[in-house]
Structure formats: C-alpha cells, structure tokens
Amino acid sequence: MSDTSKDEEQPAEDLDPFADDGTAILLQEDSEADALLIAFGGLFGSVAVPVYEFAKFASSLSAKGMFLRDPHRAWYFRGLPEAGDDLLSVEKVLAGHLERLQPRRVVAVGASAGGFAALHFGARLGFDEVHAFSPQTTVAKWQRFRLGDRRWKKDIRNIHSSPAENRVFEDLVPTLSSRRPGSTFHVHYCHTEGLDVAHAMRIASCEDVFLHAYAEGDHKVIRWLKKRGELSRILEASLRG
C-alpha cells in the first residue's frame, strides 16, 4: 500500500481496513443514492462502527458516506492534516464536498467529541438532520469547570492550543442559535450519565433541538443502540427524510 500519511482524503474502498495511515477523510461515493451520511469520529476515531466498516455501513443505509476523524484529538479545533489548522478550514473542505456532490439530503452523526463536531458543522453548514450521541456541548474551560466536567484533560489542552479565533466556537449555544434554517438536531444520551445529561440540557432550549434520553448505555449509548438495532433504524429514517 502506498504511503498516504499526508493525504487529506482517500476513497474508503482503497484503504487497508486495518491500517491507520493518518487519513482524515474517507469517502464512499460508489452508491447511486442521493442522500449523504457524514460521520464524525470521536477521540478514538470510530462512531460505533469501526472506521474500516464505515463504507459498508453507509451502503447498507442506501447512502453515500463521508467519514472524518481527528488525528489531533482536539474536537476538530486544530483542523485536519493538509486541510488547514482550525475549524473553519474543516468547514471549507466539507462545504466543497457538498457543492460537488449536491446531495438531496445530508445527515450527520457523531458520538462524544464527534457529536460536538456533528452539531457544530451541522449548524454552520445547514445539514438537514444531525444525530449526536452523548455529545459535549461546550469545551470552554470555565463552562467545563461549572459543569464539573474533568474528563479528557490532556485532550482538552489540544483545543486551547489551537488558533485563538477558534474560541468563539467553544460553546455550541450561540452556534446553534445562529444556525442556518431548516436543520434539525437530535441529542441522544443515557439519563443516568450525569455529565452527558448536563451537556444536553445546556442546548435544550435552542430551536429545533430534540433530546432523547435512554435508560441504559452510559456514555457509550450509541453502541448500546447499535446492538439493539436502533442506530440503523434511526439513521435510515433520517436519511429518507
């Protein structure tokens, strides 16, 4: 396999399924479907489905697929390899793909840090529907302190070392409040996971945000839903519109 460590993107079907070559954007475009599923990987890369299975997963939902993963482990605040060093650079790359593909419907999914990204870019780019599972809704230092959220301290520092102009995006409340019209946001979380509940409640009053609480699953509620067959059902319905 050729060295692709510096590539911005690479077709998903060409990837060695067990390699971690630093690819930041994987594309699955061989489907004739007119819907696009965009998945944002979290701190550990996957979104319930391993990276190497994502192309197959998207095809099973009758959708084209785009998978993003953040090798900087910085909630995408430090950009992606060969695609700039901040959130706005990632937004520009996504906008370019949307312009090229012209999908009828765009659905985004992400868990934890990937859920933050799905909500952020969904609001900024006007995705039709977003499903965020156990997402953080702020990564601002003082707001995390108020919530008592001390998780991922080392990774959070990666955000605070990102370009200063990123700081305006650390809280999702203003981003969602100034979103493009026509988008719907669904936040899924386990009601016994206190910090996930607190993050969800922060955006509960934002327009077109819907909360879905579950009795089980803890912070990995997306995996719990996948095992029950619910994740595919949720995304299939969302992609149909």
Image (tube, helix red, strand yellow):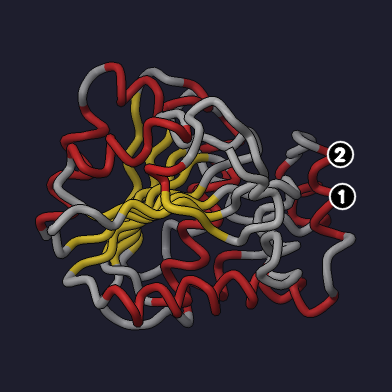
Residue pictured at 72% horizontal, 45% vertical? 73
Residue 21 picture location, percent across and down: 65, 40
Residue 164 picture location, percent across and down: 85, 75
Residue 9 located left or right of residue 163: left
* The N terminus sits in image quarter: top right
Residue pictured at 44% horizontal, 72% vertical? 123
Residue pictured at 16% horizontal, 36% vertical? 233
Residue 199 vs residue 234, the one in the foreground: 234
Residue 235 located left or right of residue 6: left
Residue 22 vs residue 239, the one in the foreground: 22
* The C terminus sits in image quarter: bottom left
Q: In the picture shown, does residue 87 fall above or below 37?
A: below
Q: Specify the amino acid type for callout 2.
A: Lys
* Residue 38 appears in the figure: yes
Q: In the picture shown, does residue 196 fall above or below 142?
A: above
Mark 1 surroundings: few (<14), some (14-19) or many (≥20) residues within 10 A:
few
Residue 10 vs residue 190, the one in the foreground: 10
Q: Please name the residue that numbered disc 1 is placed on.
A: 157
Q: Please name the residue that numbered disc 2 is placed on.
A: 154
* Residue 201 appears in the figure: no
Q: In the picture shown, does residue 161 fall above or below 13?
A: below
The disc at residue 172 is: none
Mark 2 surroundings: few (<14), some (14-19) or many (≥20) residues within 10 A:
few
Residue 234 located left or right of residue 221: left
Residue 20 picture location, percent across and down: 63, 34
Give the Cα distance between marks 1 and 2.
5 Å
Marks 1 & 2, CB-CB < 8 Å contact: yes
Question: Is label 2 in a helix, a strand or a loop?
Answer: helix
Residue 92 located left or right of residue 169: left
Q: Specify the amino acid type for callout 1.
A: Arg
